[in-house]
Image (tube, coloured by chain):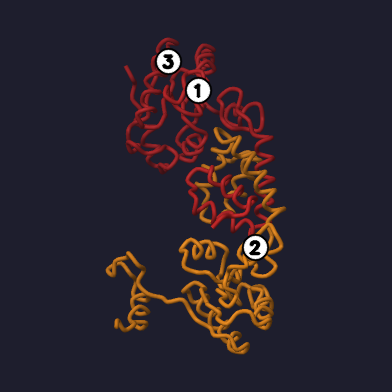
Chain colours: A orange, B red
Amino acid sequence: MKHSPALAGLIDALRTLPGVGPKSAQRMAFHLLQEGRVGAGALAQALGSALAAVRRCERCRMLTETPLCAICENPRRDGTLLCVVESPADVVAIESSGSYRGRYFVLMGHLSPLDGIGPEQLGIRDLEALLAAGGPRELILATNPTVEGEATAHFLSDIARRHGVAATRIAHGVPIGGELEYVDGGTLAHALAGRQSIS
Amino acid sequence: MKHSPALAGLIDALRTLPGVGPKSAQRMAFHLLQEGRVGAGALAQALGSALAAVRRCERCRMLTETPLCAICENPRRDGTLLCVVESPADVVAIESSGSYRGRYFVLMGHLSPLDGIGPEQLGIRDLEALLAAGGPRELILATNPTVEGEATAHFLSDIARRHGVAATRIAHGVPIGGELEYVDGGTLAHALAGRQSIS
């Protein structure tokens, strides 16, 4: 069945959202045009304001509405620690763990030459400027444990070395609360290789 | 971690979409503000146009951009068959099964007294007018096989009887407790072919 043009346009636009397929997009569109009309107007407006207001932090590339993000502006954060992550969602995840008091650098992706994503797209020049300025003493590489994330971490550790900054990688292993039985082989191999002495 | 106001507003607006929780909403918002900025603008625009253009068919209450929807305007559809469904997505599902050549009536919900949804909210007066006008000879009740859907079907079968119109219920090849929108075309075709008279 062919949808009317405006409806088809809305469904197509919703499909660009991550994790939304044709059926979900249709369900969302019908919802927005039936009981959700108020929400639909609010969503259109929220999209407009966010697009206009949200930009990248001048120092760490995190999404923010001010020149510097709240973390970069906070004088109580430890400026000697710089944690490199792939996305703003990773910053949110680490912040909610409550276990880190340093600063961040958000790559907004990972090295992926086939997709045309090289050091320039990831703001590596800005990162080098931060290292050269002399604040950070340790670069914590918290890119994803994927092939691309590992390659990116390796690339960044070389840069850190050139600037005389220690590079560390977050530990990989069995997730706390998880069951060994359901953990994949790659993770188990990492967990075994990275075993530490209990003293 | 507290999000900036425009970002928090966008996440809240996205959460009103069906099937989108806080984590998906955050993921969508970050996507829209990073690589998806073009898509975000398009989505805001598509929402605006759809809200302005899409309304209900004057005859069957289906979502449409013209006074009458494409199905009601099509002279080759069998006007003696009227299929009552709960939502526009159900019309799409039945149409893609390719097994129905009659017309539709879209309730946009089901009877739910606790939520204040009675006959008036479902356009039952329009449905009675259609039956009184004398076109339909059979009212096919294709509401969802849920408690509310069954109650609505029962209520509508009484109305059909008062107008001397046969009322049939789609066969329960449709899984009980499921939603019509997610049933495959073959099952829907079976359900339509196996419809039985409600006496």
Front tag of 3 and 2 = 2
In this view, the residue in front, B36 or B181, is B36
A45 to the left or right of B166: right
Residue A104, position as x, y percentages in the image: 58, 70
What chain is tagged by disc 1? B
In this view, the residue in front, A74 or A106, is A74
Label pair 3/2, CB-CB below 8 angstroms: no
Q: In the figure, A37 relative to B141: above or below?
A: below
Q: Amino acid at mark 1?
A: Leu
Residue B122, numbered circle: 1
Q: In the figure, B113 relative to A73: above or below?
A: above
Quadrant occupied by the C terminus of chain B: top left
Marks 3 & 1 on one chain: yes
A57 to the left or right of A150: right
Q: Residues within 10 Å of mark 3 (few under 14, many from 20)?
A: many
What chain is tagged by disc 2? A
A77 to the left or right of B110: right
- N-term mark: 3 or 1: 1
Residue A69, numbered circle: 2
Q: In the figure, A59 relative to B92: above or below?
A: below
- What is the secondary structure assignment of the residue under circle 2? loop
